Amino acid sequence: MNLKHYVLTALAVSALTMPWAGVSQAAAADASAQATAAKTASAVSSATAVKADTAAKSDAAAAKAKQVKYNLKFNAKNYTKETLQLDGKDVAFRAYRDVVYVSKPASVASESMSVFIPEAYFQKGGSVNGYTAKTAPIFLPNGVGGYMPGEIKEPSANDRMSGGANASLVALSKGYVVAAPAIRGRTTVGDDGKTYVGKAPAFLVDYKAAVRYLRYNRHRLPAGNTDKIISDGTSAGGALSALLGATGNSREYAAELKAIGAANERDDIFASMDYCPITNLDHADMAYEWMFNGVNEAHQSSAPMSPLLPLKAGSMPGAIKAGDMVVPLGPGPVVQGDGGMVTDRPANAPTETSAGTEMTQEQRVASDQLKALFPDYVNSLGLKDRQGHTLMLNEDGTGSFADYIKSVYAASAQSALDAGEDLSSLDWLIIENGLVKDVDLAKYAAWATRLKAAPAFDKFDLSSGENDEFGTSDNTPRHFTGFSLTRDKKMGATMATWDDIRRMNPLCFIGQKGVTVAPHWRIRHGAKDRDTCLAIPAILALTLQNNGYDVDFSSPWGKGHAGDYDLTELFDWADGLCKAPTKK
């Protein structure tokens, strides 16, 4: 990934600052003008960001002198013995809670983790599922959603989404050590009570710091193999898990890690489990319109989401308000307004209404323009399928890459057919003699429905969670594509720095010298998930695969935007890797 790919997200200011510019004009904009627009926007916004952050840094410097330093040595004596039930059987474990994993936290509450260890490992010769205290893999789940603060994923027998045991409890039952960190998010206020300390790329810096803490304490932990750390996340947490897997030991995060007092250890991991990752944000708008262009009714609530109550230092709001609807950020029912809120959504995912809203003419034009930009981006990547065939797109959006996306959906539908489901009513599937022969992507998009109006992520009015994620320490949202920056009608809108944009995209690190990418990947994107386009996780999977990494990628039938819905298969996959003979 290089500046060329970033430039493809921007349009020439001279040709396209008018929102009604024609599609052909947008697609044919001169590349050098695009580069100038992107570089200028990034330089100007970088200078603005530095200016805006000066006061905050001054306050932070003053607070630093008074800051209490935390000891990074794990205390193996500070635990409670606990037991939960799973499928009628006891799962006994020791819980080491609220361990601060950096020595100079910006937010103590958001930079603490809890470690859970199966009780069997404290008995002589104890083992679980073939693992011992020495060989037990370490499961590293994150609770991030919507780029909001991630809470510690405590073992639970009553998960909000599945109604059953969550991944942490299942992992313990399978003999895994569970290390569950809290993580800063876009609304995290530092312990100084003034500064927003969770903007990009803070959540990844924290996840890396948690890995480093475990490695620093590898001889102090009562159990756990720190060479077999496996991350897991959903939605923005899926993006975080992917970023952790793709950026191992990269020096590009060194300054931020040092600032919070992360341990001087490796931060690469063994495997990355990513459910519906909301990633590759600088190209996600183009991909979304490539898929959903022509579907002009969006189901995401148009009201910006904002905290109901003032934030406290180190905390996250208990609920947010979207229009007239109150949405709790943890377990609990949704209070519905007149729009009819869809409740089957991951924590902190964008709010969805059952009734759609027609896109404006401006949004429809943006959809046409963004769709026209996507082929050039895809073609710049040099992607190949498993047979070595190059995956490309024609100017009209058709081509071998589109055929590949069709094949992923076809495989998903075939699995449903083989399981006995009746799919005869689905007009986007061509089925002959019990076999899925073809997929009509335009009809698929109409069936799946559009969640987000164009642009899906970098909103012209800076109202998305992603705009907030790329915001400044004084909580001013920023753009992260030249396309949207040049269409923002407000004075003073700025762009995130290129360093921050690229450090939030795993594609920028795969194949980069000095980076240790996780060798094993499991990526899932539901067949009816439209929080991002299937093309985005597909590009991630193909890029990893093309670089020689082990990738298990699919689109499970009947699943929307969700995660951890196939825990038996997930841990079977992980066990297969962890128990495989070590190659010499």
Image (cartoon, grey):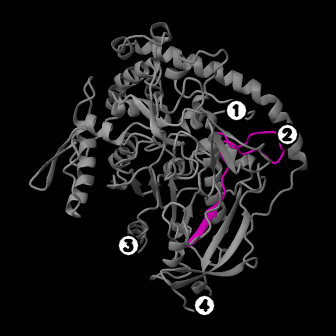
The residue depicted at 60 percent of the width and 41 percent of the height is: 252
Q: Residue furthest top?
A: 14
The residue depicted at 48 percent of the width and 64 percent of the height is: 162
To which residue does mark 2 refer?
A: 61
Q: Under tag 2, what secondary structure?
A: helix
- Verify whether residue 179 appears in magenta: yes
The image's mark for residue 232 is: none
- Foreground mark, 4 or 1? 1
Q: State the residue in front, 201 or 329.
A: 329
Q: Are marks 3 and 2 in contact (CB under 8 Å)?
A: no
| Magenta residues (range) | 177-199
First of labels 2, 1 by sequence position: 2
- In whole angstroms, how far apart are the C-alphas of marks 4 and 3? 25 Å
To which residue does mark 3 refer?
A: 580
Q: Residues within 10 Å of mark 4 (few under 14, many from 20)?
A: few
To which residue does mark 4 refer?
A: 123
- The residue under label 4 is which amino acid type? Gln
Q: Main secondary structure of the magenta part?
A: loop
- Foreground mark, 2 or 1? 1
Q: From this viewpoint, is residue 391 visible?
A: no
User: Looking at the picture, does residue 498 appear above or below residue 248?
Assistant: above
Q: Under tag 3, what secondary structure?
A: loop
- The residue under label 3 is which amino acid type? Ala
- In whole angstroms, how far apart are the C-alphas of marks 2 and 4? 48 Å
- Verify whether residue 133 appears in magenta: no
User: Looking at the picture, does residue 299 appear above or below residue 103?
Assistant: above
First of labels 2, 4 by sequence position: 2
First of labels 1, 3 by sequence position: 1
- The residue under label 1 is which amino acid type? Thr
- Residue 224 at x, y = what percent? 57, 74
Q: Are marks 4 and 3 in contact (CB under 8 Å)?
A: no
Viewport quadrant of the C terminus: bottom left
